Image (spheres, rainbow, N blue to C red):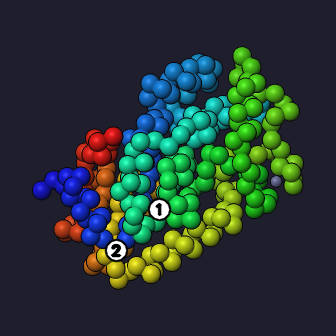
Amino acid sequence: MNKTLNDIKELINNADCILIGAGSGLSTAAGIDYRGEEFKKEFAPFIKKYGFTDLYSSSFYNYPTQEEYWGAWAKHIYFANTGRNGTELYKKIFDLVKNKEYFVITTNVDDQFYKTGFDKDKIFRVQGSYALNQCSKGCHNRLYSNVELVNNMLDSIDDDLKVPTELVPICPVCGESMEPNLRKDGYFIQDDVWYKQNDKYEKFLDENKNKNVLLLEFGVGFNTPGIIRFPFEQMTSQNENWKLIRFNKEDMTFLELDDRFIGIKEDINKFFRV
Ligand SMILES: [Zn+2]
């Protein structure tokens, strides 16, 4: 039988605690669309100059200069993260769990959980953040907010989509270029906060293994299934008091199926009546 929002609320109320796992499908549903109309409109000059068709593939574009790299990345970072407030969908999810014990693990780098009321001590942001810069060679273990830098870049970008050379950030330790803190190669920086939140996640799993845990998995596909999707299934299999609700429009397969595995294919926005 299809579950309704009221069924989900009841499951949340009856659980001892909630574990949320979120992937890109949640942010797409929330309106941060990497290929839709807003992208095409906002990025029109970039699409014309570089020919990319969506924001994700633009990440791998080989820009000829740092001034062009940062012109495109400043726009990208602002579009997906620093220029956005918390979205209604994430706020609805927060309202559902805010009075429960909960923890969030996410591969999303748009920081929506931080913008919609979730306790930052209860968020493990595994793959980094658009709003932080790191040394491109990973020479030291520190991250730098780029919020103000991105605003300045967008204020001064020229018609050729370049930022002024004096705004191009340079690593203060080794002098190499900087880049957003995103896991795309072996130089990804995991700073002290990353390790602290990783420990908290492990502790949450360990402390609650014998309790009634409800896992809410939102929009997690097969890009990096080893971080959330597969562990969520395995942990639910191994803990008979755990239940997993998978929200996914496209990839609704389970390794095994019994009544503790619940799939919801409906659009997440519609389901939560955003
Ligand atoms: Zn460096």
Kindly identify which numbered label has been placed on residue 47: none
Residue 150 in the image: state x and y as whole percent: 70, 36
Residue 201 in the image: state x and y as whole percent: 51, 71
Q: Which residue reaches farthest left?
A: 1
Q: Which residue reaches farthest front?
A: 99
In the rendered image, which quarter is residue 94 located in?
Answer: bottom left
- What's under tag 2, amino acid-wise? Asp
Tag 1 and tag 2, C-beta contact below 8 Å = no
C-alpha separation, residue under disc 1 versus residue under disc 2: 15 Å
Residue 139 in the image: state x and y as whole percent: 79, 58
In the rendered image, which quarter is residue 155 located in?
Answer: top right
- What's under tag 1, amino acid-wise? Val
Let me know if residue 81 appears in the view: yes
Q: Is residue 140 left or right of residue 48?
A: right
Q: Is residue 169 left or right of residue 207?
A: right
Residue at horizontal 80%, vertical 41%? 169
Kindly identify which numbered label has been placed on residue 16: 2
For the residue labelled by badge 2, is the local secondary structure a helix, a strand or a loop?
A: loop
Respond yes or no on whether mark 1 lies under 8 Å from ligand 1.
no
Kindly identify which numbered label has been placed on residue 104: 1
